[in-house]
Amino acid sequence: MPTGDSLGLAEAKSPQEVEVVTYISHLECPKCGRSYAPFQPNNVCQCGAPLLVRYNLGEMARSISRRELKRRKPGMWKYADFLPVANEDNIVSLGEGGTPMLRTKSLGKALGIDNLWIKDEGLNATGSFKARGASCGISRCKELGIDKIAMPTAGNAGGAWSCYAAKAGIESYIVMPIDAEKVPMLECYLSGAKTYLVKGLISDAGKIIAKGAAKYGWFDVSTLKEPYRIEGKKTMGLEIAEDFDWGAPDVILYPTGGGVGLIGIWKAYQELIEMGWVKGKMPKLVAVQAEGCMPIVQAYNEGKDHSEFWPNATTVAGGVRVPKALGDFLVLQAIRETGGTAIAISDPELIEGVKLTALTEGMFICPEGGATVAAARHLVQTGFIKPEDKVVILNTGTGLKYPEIIKPDLPVLEIGGEIVL
Amino acid sequence: MPTGDSLGLAEAKSPQEVEVVTYISHLECPKCGRSYAPFQPNNVCQCGAPLLVRYNLGEMARSISRRELKRRKPGMWKYADFLPVANEDNIVSLGEGGTPMLRTKSLGKALGIDNLWIKDEGLNATGSFKARGASCGISRCKELGIDKIAMPTAGNAGGAWSCYAAKAGIESYIVMPIDAEKVPMLECYLSGAKTYLVKGLISDAGKIIAKGAAKYGWFDVSTLKEPYRIEGKKTMGLEIAEDFDWGAPDVILYPTGGGVGLIGIWKAYQELIEMGWVKGKMPKLVAVQAEGCMPIVQAYNEGKDHSEFWPNATTVAGGVRVPKALGDFLVLQAIRETGGTAIAISDPELIEGVKLTALTEGMFICPEGGATVAAARHLVQTGFIKPEDKVVILNTGTGLKYPEIIKPDLPVLEIGGEIVL
């Protein structure tokens, strides 16, 4: 029997019947330090900051081994011990995680980096890294008996959460900008989400969701407004660490909108270092944004702890078109504590990054991924990246979801025609 | 260091320096029985039929174990022993294979099948099962020193082969129907393939490629015109067998255009049975086609060994719009010898299959996959599928590559608006 059997849509159980197989301890506010029990639905802290999941890491380190992990079936849920789901029956999976870490020698040569890898999150269900957060978040919704979720989205998160909600039998309400990519709209629509477009940005969509959640009792799963999405994203960091034989590359470049992925990778390394599984220093985390929406970069350059709302945000890379992130202070802290940096890329440059990667590596990455490629080039030029550094680029999704970003002009032949060179 | 390191673009070696790590024995014509040495480029047999790769299976069975396979890093190349590449340095990989086998209980309930799984090939590089064939085929091109390939395509194969060729530094020439999906055109264009559109079908594209290959010396990698694509596709069968603990489901439904995937799965089971790794009977193989292009179904129904060219082929499922397949006789043999069948689905029904799968399972499958879902429903009704049968549906690609197949009509809100239920 396929192992997938145990990852299917099981009968729902009441929380009381849940058998604890997680090392979850409590939820903690990284701003004011308050803690909360993890046994009922939680959004943000009383102080308004996002909550982070804390585990009994010592107990975990004593109970499982890296060797045991290596033997498990690949995919995100092999790291179940590091995740907050208590009962395996509540796991809602579409085969996310376990994405390839590809050595990209030709691209590296073009950029002047000897040791360059791309971790390709396009090979996830729903075509992006959002699948990890949705799988973990929806699994916890199921575990806690939540039957209606709601969120604003730039596109990919909505596509992922509505698909995982459909798999779990949970209703979903999604609002996205009217100029978001068409493919995620289709994912939401087909998976049965109640899907709305707004003539504005993701921040405008967020306000509409907040009103609806207050009125209709939907559980608000906006970025960092529930504590479990980040845990799913954290598995990117666990995989990178395992790929590097429980070590770290020197630099990780991450396209940063809401910033959950970057915070998640940081959290993964914090936990692994605390457990003693990873020795030595953290990877330097680099937040990559678009010039048309660079609140984190601005705050970083100005030495501030929080970002300012970025007015008139505009970029073709929808995933980083986030004018103000709830977790901005955590992103800034992660960058500074790891010795990273923040950098903004123009739209023409990020599209050039997409093209260069396709041409040299045969990988059709997303515009956000293209921004990190362009960022790597800049950071070599500034000397931030040394030629001998091990550098990982996070490609957050497949370019297949952006069919309109580049228009090829192809020659047309008649039936019976021939190619003349 | 990531294992990906060893899967990168290595320095090319001359065939003479190749270290043999494969069990390849020879190439064999399944029609006339002629055999060929596998040490230089081969297309088809002198008799015009496709060539199949034969291995020293006894030696392989003595040298590797199922336990050892389980320990290897996931993905298609964990089955390297079953594949024709002699030198690991020639492997061209974008992280293909190791796709999830998902238990689909809600869809199964809707169709009346208790034990239904979908193997989701959408989670491959380039978003389809074509990645497997391209990875193996391009790796062998690299190994044999081929530097220019050419092929006709309905879309996905061209996208895959041009991306893998780019990764390997091999030039590619692609011709596809002018009404093919736009996303694969973009994949070919971005990865640097010389890409042409033809005002006709894949069969018209094939004639143009054949002329160009004769004139310019390109290596023709059309479906089954070289022997290695099928070996990559074979790994789907190896994975299914391993997923079922070295056994088989009762029925496998496969969308059939060129038929290479179906032949590949059949070949995998033949080899595993010969090695003694799989005991018992073969899975019944079902070829699913579209009503607008059903040459295999017609030949099957008429008891013929070969199909007739299907005139005026038309269906939204481009992957099965193949009027005449070179391997038709092998597909028909596979169906008959395994006790399978062949069935055609109308376009509205296959789109309904896509919708039903998204709604019940949160999976956005391709139209070809939708056809297999519709086929499963029909075959339950005819009694071919028994309620207790273990049934595997092969979803050959992600629906993300078909953004225009369904047009959602979504409500639009103003900034500051609200959702009213």
Image (cartoon, coloured by chain):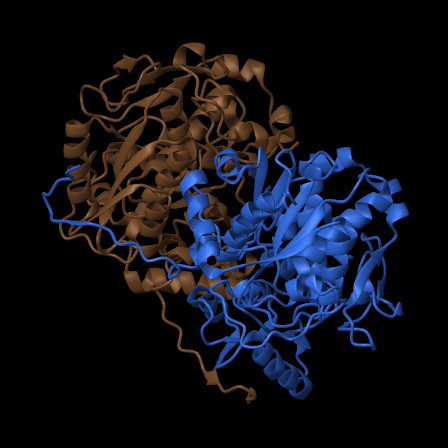
Chain colours: A brown, B blue
Residue A410: x and y, percent? 43, 78
Residue A274: x and y, percent? 46, 21
Q: Is residue B300 left or right of residue B183?
A: right
Q: Is residue A295 left or right of residue B368?
A: left
Of B260 and A368, the residue lying toward us:
B260
Farthest top residue?
A: A16
Image: A10 above or below A283: above
- Report the residue at 77% width, 72% height from top: B41
Q: Quadrant of residue A66?
A: top right
Of A413 and B388, the residue lying toward us:
B388
* Visible residue check, residue A244: no
Image: B77 above or below A246: below
Q: Quadrant of the C terminus of chain B?
A: top left
Q: Quadrant of the N terminus of chain B?
A: top right
* Visible residue check, residue A311: yes
Residue A372: x and y, percent? 38, 52
Q: Quadrant of residue A326?
A: top left
Image: B221 above or below B393: below
- Report the residue at 69% width, 36% height from top: B244
